[in-house]
Image (cartoon, coloured by chain):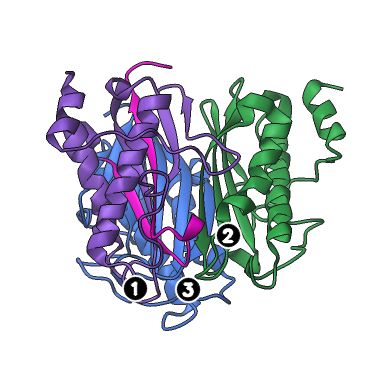
Chain colours: A purple, B green, C blue
């Protein structure tokens, strides 16, 4: 097994088939040595495990877990559409959108569910710039959406 | 007529004069072979046709139409500030912000109003990565805002 | 003093120590000649001066001032993590997130607090593309968050 496949295996992660784009766009657009990954929802086997607001129907811990699932789905999309995970040099930027109410303050903790996974998988080169913000609602009622910009080793 | 001018004509689109920036920024910033287009509102002749929430005062169909208008305004901005539409190689990323309430779920459908236009105009190279999210409000009460990253054929 | 240090001094700005990242990410990620700055909160001496909604507990003028503080903190992060401010060629894109209610319309005015500072510091090359949107809440209850993409003179 390659290093990264071994790492995923050690983390107990089996890459799903990349979720299809929900609409008229592509899961990943590669431009030069950067891969722009569309906003990922925390689909598991084609379904959202939970819907609603983090801090409301969805607990902070669940929100973190959902953000991690978004990140796993981003990895799956990169694997299928950016030359395989071995071609990913690192993660440059992560955008974290959290469905929540007006008094929610823990957007960074939710985002860590995604950020920590990228560090675990890519090590130092997985450390990224990030913006985490709140939204009144997200597509399909998802509690979390995660967008990723990754750098590539070689063009695809 | 050039290919792209013909395409716009076939789609019944006449490019407006690019809406001016609403504030202390520029409509388009070119950096290398990428053009960053500022968040576009659906201005028509300098006015917002509608304000309010999609799924509330504004129907889904109207929201889609407004997203398409944002995309047209982005094309106008690229035409004026990125070397003409002939210099646009494709669309890399689209950010869609939808003003909506907590139970809205159709952000992707709204975004399609913009995404489908880019595909119609640029074909395969118009297919892009995308993030679509909800917001409690947008500038000037706009129901939709669309941000675009486009790739260029030549530096400007 | 260098030109840019002189400019900051003329503006009465003393760069703070860059606020640490609040969570599992880095303040700045450099990729080639672009520096991605994580979403900045308006920390002063490690504390948020205000929390809540702009247009609610926080006035528009306060919101503008907080956006300016976010921009100052972004400059501090670039100074520490992107080869010093002398290495910043310009500002490419600014994302402005405003915590606000459903009837707020002045997101662009809030964003100007950041945008105008970048123009004052970097002149013409500080003029950037921008997207300004509303959010029900932001990390730690912050009224404003500002994300920055800057261009560099030399790799770091």
Mark 1 surroundings: few (<14), some (14-19) or many (≥20) residues within 10 A = few
In which quadrant of the rendered view does residue C82 lie? top left
Q: Can residue A124 be seen?
A: no
Q: How many marks do you count on the picture?
A: 3
Tell me where the magenta segment starts and ends, as one range: A128-156
Which residue has dot 2 on it? B98
From this view, report whether residue A47 is shown above or below residue C54.
above
Mark 3 surroundings: few (<14), some (14-19) or many (≥20) residues within 10 A = many
Q: Are marks 1 and 3 in contact (CB under 8 Å)?
A: no
Callout 3: chain: C
Q: Return the x and y of residue B122 as percentages of the image width and height.
A: 69, 28
Which residue has dot 1 on it? A56
Q: Residue at x 71, y 46 (%)?
A: B73
Q: Nearer the viewer, residue B84 or A71?
A: A71
- Label 1 element class: loop
Q: Residue at x 81, y 33 (%)?
A: B8
Mark 2 surroundings: few (<14), some (14-19) or many (≥20) residues within 10 A = many
Quarter of the C terminus of chain A within the rendering? top left
From mark 3 to mark 2, how far is it between C-alphas? 15 Å
Same-chain status of marks 1 and 2: no
Q: Are marks 1 and 2 in contact (CB under 8 Å)?
A: no
From mark 1 to mark 3, how far is it between C-alphas? 19 Å
Quarter of the N terminus of chain A within the rendering? top left
Which residue has dot 3 on it? C100
- Label 3 element class: loop
Q: Is residue B114 left or right of residue C93?
A: right
Verify whether residue A153 appears in magenta.
yes
Callout 1: chain: A
Callout 2: chain: B
């Amino acid at each position: 097994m390659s290093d990264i496949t071994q790492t995923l295996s050690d983390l107990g992660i089996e890459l799903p088939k990349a979720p299809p784009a929900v609409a008229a766009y592509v899961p990943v657009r590669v431009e030069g040595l950067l891969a722009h990954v569309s906003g990922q929802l925390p689909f598991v086997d084609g379904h959202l495990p939970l819907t609603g607001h983090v801090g409301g129907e969805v607990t902070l811990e669940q929100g973190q877990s959902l953000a991690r699932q978004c990140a796993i789905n981003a990895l799956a999309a990169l694997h299928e559409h950016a030359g395989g995970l071995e071609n990913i040099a690192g993660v440059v930027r992560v955008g974290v959108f959290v469905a929540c109410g007006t008094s929610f303050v823990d957007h960074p903790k939710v985002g860590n569910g995604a950020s920590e996974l990228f560090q675990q998988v890519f090590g130092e080169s997985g450390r990224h710039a990030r913006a985490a913000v709140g939204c009144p609602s997200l597509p399909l009622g998802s509690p979390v959406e995660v967008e990723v910009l990754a750098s590539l080793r070689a063009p695809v």
